[in-house]
Amino acid sequence: MKFLRASILALLLLLASCGSRPTYVQITGFAQGGPWYVTCSLDDAARAEGLKQAIDDTLSAIDWSVSGYNKGSLLTKVNNGENPPLDSIFIDLMNLSRRLWVETGGAFDVSGAPLFDLWGFGFKEGRMPSQQAVDSAMAVVGMDKYSMVEGPDGKTYLRMPTGGKVNFNAIAQGYSCDVVARVLDSWGSENYMVSLGGELVCKGLSARGDEWRVWIDRPQDGNNDSGVLKQDVITITDCSLVTSGNYRKFYVVDGVKYSHTIDPSTGRPVNHDLLSATVLAEDGATADALATALMVAGPEKGRKMASDWITRGRGVYLVYGSQDDMKVWHTPGLKLESGN
């Protein structure tokens, strides 16, 4: 799992319309292990309760499809070796994941679930996975080993190797923001920011009448609360933003820090000095996956990947170095408070 680090600079409870400005409301709830926030313009603030219910229903459907924490979810059944028919959410995420696996050269790989389990649970119990265990997990990693097929009943099923698993943690929350954004579009909102687990999708203008301002957390080890230590503030609109980092989930064994980010090509935690990666992209799922891919790639390869993405209108903000000497690299054109 990864942590996705960006928090809204200011969340507005309720802003009445002023002159020609629309009415803005803030709606909050709880899903996928944490709170979600929506700040949006609405033609009638009295519709906020109905909108919240629509968002809750949408997020609940995603949870029952692809949550690894929901013991009754479709994903849990798939990973337990059952063979249930896939729903549209699962199919959508598998297709997105395969596309992004290809685009990132395998740095983003939802089929790395056996490795994520191996290193995560192993460390929690205070022991290092054996090379044999790593090799065994690696044998079922790789999206080329997974495919969706149509059964005799006309439904879609996931075909994967024995012992294979998938884990959507590095894309599901960004995807969820995208789906919530579509709900807001269907309700006629022309200005909004959706935040779930730190992943953001925004459109139009904030209640102040200008673009949305987002706080990027400083990747200091142990900085577990968003909005406490600021790295920078970035101004955005009509895009998605996700930050991934290794400063909130890591293990120290015999004085060595091991990141929770696992490189699918080696089967082991990454070993480089990239501390966090922020991605601006066309949608939340893409931003989510690319932020993970950058954390796998490291600062040098990450800069090359980011430079290639500029032509697609994407932006990247990297923090690398040591805890005592952090450095920043970013693609041109980002609207940063620091001006750097």
Image (cartoon, rainbow, N blue to C red):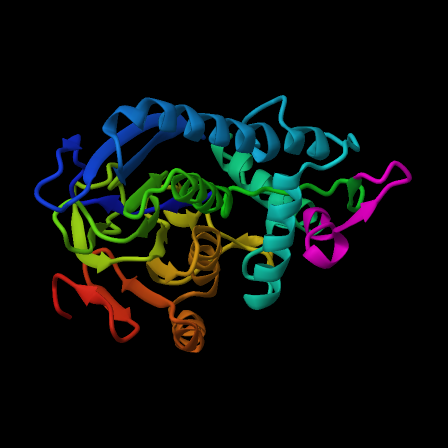
Please report the bounds of the magenta region as a residue range. Answer: 136-155
Q: Is residue 130 visible?
A: no
Q: Residue furthest left?
A: 19
Residue 297 spot, x, y in % from top left: 47, 65
37 is higher (above) or lower (below) than 150: above
Pick whichever, 93 or 218, lies toward us.
93
Please indicate whether residue 267 sits to the left or right of residue 58 in the image: right
Residue drawn at x 62%, y 65% is 102
Residue 45 spot, x, y in % from top left: 24, 29
Image quarter of the C terminus: bottom left
70 is higher (above) or lower (below) than 115: above
Residue drawn at x 26%, y 36% is 43
Pick whichever, 257 or 190, lies toward us.
190
Residue 67 spot, x, y in % from top left: 56, 32
**Residue 185 colored in magenta in the image:** no
Pick whichever, 292 or 288, lies toward us.
288
Residue drawn at x 12%, y 48% is 208
97 is higher (above) or lower (below) than 249: below
Q: Is residue 139 visible?
A: yes
Pick whichever, 13 or 48, lies toward us.
48
How many marks on residues?
0
Residue 263 spot, x, y in % from top left: 54, 57
**Residue 141 colored in magenta in the image:** yes
User: Residue 158 occupies which quadrant of the picture?
Assistant: top right
